[in-house]
Amino acid sequence: MNSVATREKRVAFLWRRFKGFWNQYRQTKRGMVGIIIIFFFAVVAVFAPILSPLDPLAPRMEGYYIHQQPKLCEKLCVPIWYKTILGMNDLSENFLTFDDHEYMTADSFTSQIEWHVLDSGYDVDVQYNPSAGTHDESGTRVDGCIEITYTRDATETPPSDGAVSVVLRREFEWPYGDPPRSFWWHYSLNVQNRTSMPVIPLSIGVQIQRGDEPQPTEVLTGSKTHVQKITSAVIGNIWGGNTDSTTEVDGIEAIIFTGRGEYAWEFVINIYDSEVGAKDITVLVDNTQAILYGNTFGLLGTSAIPKPTPRDLFTMLLYGTRISFMIGLLTAVFSVMIGLFVGLVAGYVRGLVDEGLMRFADFLMVLPGLPLLIVLVTVLGRSIWNIIGVLIFMGWMGFSRSVRSMVLSLRERPFIESAKASGAGIGYIIYRHILPNVFALVYISLATSVPGAIISEASLAWLGLGDVNIPSWGLMLYDFSRTETAVVTGLGQYWFWVVPPGIAIALMALAFILMGFSLDEILNPRLRQRR
């Protein structure tokens, strides 16, 4: 019972001390500004996945054939609010021509496409199959698809070229004045009921036209050809395929899209079969999609790196908050702990221990900081943990000397002499008598050490020595510096790439500095007497 009562009294005493400290702290305007900024960044760091669920390093669209997800956006897109705030109404956005490319319901099939057969020789039937769509990673069918059945009497002579084409047509309206930056189409095919023929060549072509007037096919048509070897034990499977317009004619988007209006995509599926007596062919078509990439995206636009999956700069900014917090806090805590231990031991023990520790600290302090960081990171590797370790190794010396100077004064005080006379050991005296008297300096040093660590990491990343697998503000600046288009154009056009991370770094550093100054005013007896 006595131990419980003692613990409750201790908790109550600590709570009263904290309330008294907080009453003093909240009277400092600088300290409250720092706390508010730090709280804002903390909320952003915690809720970054909710604020932006995108992958910060390699964002891609979900819901397509495995390992063939399209890129999320085009490179160097401007923020989407340019359209409203700056009045650039003609700017284009990403546009999906199929609302339900996975054909989850029969209505998706009937409402989205028209179809017709271009060549004879087969009886062709196109219908919706609700349970034979593409599969997930476990092999389970997850949606419906279009089922195309080619039927031919085995005694009939096939067409001379063996080709039968089915056109799936999707009409849509382009709502923007500017043409898209690029376009990308995707499809999934599964060929069934073919086990006797050694090779089935398949090709699928895509053509776009404005209204009922087709554009020049040599410019607008793209195709992919698959050759699938079939044996008696294997049913023909061809799942997935995509083509990016960037591999086609330069400027094709401006030729196709002349402004707002009605357009149509045509997916042309060709079956080549010249063998007499061939069996029926069933082709399952799924994930038919044509994505038109606009020149605006997100709240802060997009980067140009990496290719071909540009990054959403707003997402990078959010996730970079986490990295800056982690680097700043871990570096500050461990460097202060090391400096506190060294300062306490050197200041109280004195003698050879003091000389050895302080001379080693002096040796590290006279070395040039940034060049040494570059050398160490280059030798150890660009891992984020190596960077944190190097920053900790280079950040404890100044604090250790400050602690040592305080301990040299405290060890001569009468209460220390009384503890020695009563038989207290070195460890007990340091822990019970000296450490509480220097702990105010720990709080201040923790707050003021964070900005230096954040800026050091950003500097290393900007120089190309950061961890490229971790989204950080420094990585955003580094990506900008190695993008020729952005660097040549300058900040005037692509300010949204480099200015936000720079402001974020400055604000977080300023917040911890303001908090450190306020703590110094409250915990430093000399400054407290002046107020």
Image (spheres, rainbow, N blue to C red):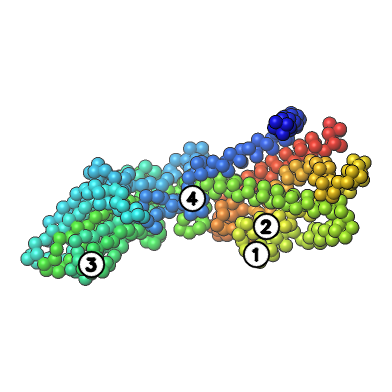
Other residues around mark 2 within 10 Å, as few (<14) / some (14–19) / many (≥20): many
Residue 358 position, x and y percent, is 84, 57
Q: Label 1, secondary structure: give it.
A: helix
Give the residue at mark 4: 55
Amino acid beneath label 4: Asp
Q: Furthest residue to the bottom?
A: 198
Which is nearer the N-term, disc 2 or disc 4?
A: 4
- Disc assigned to residue 380: 1
Q: Do the residues labelled 3 and 4 touch (CB within 8 Å)?
A: no
Q: Are marks 1 and 2 in contact (CB under 8 Å)?
A: yes
CA gap, disc 3 and disc 4: 40 Å
Amino acid beneath label 1: Leu
CA gap, disc 1 and disc 3: 53 Å
Q: Nearer the viewer, mark 3 or mark 4?
A: 3
Which is nearer the N-term, disc 1 or disc 4?
A: 4
Give the residue at mark 2: 389
How many numbered dots are placed on residues in this image? Answer: 4
Q: Furthest residue to the left?
A: 155
Give the residue at mark 3: 233
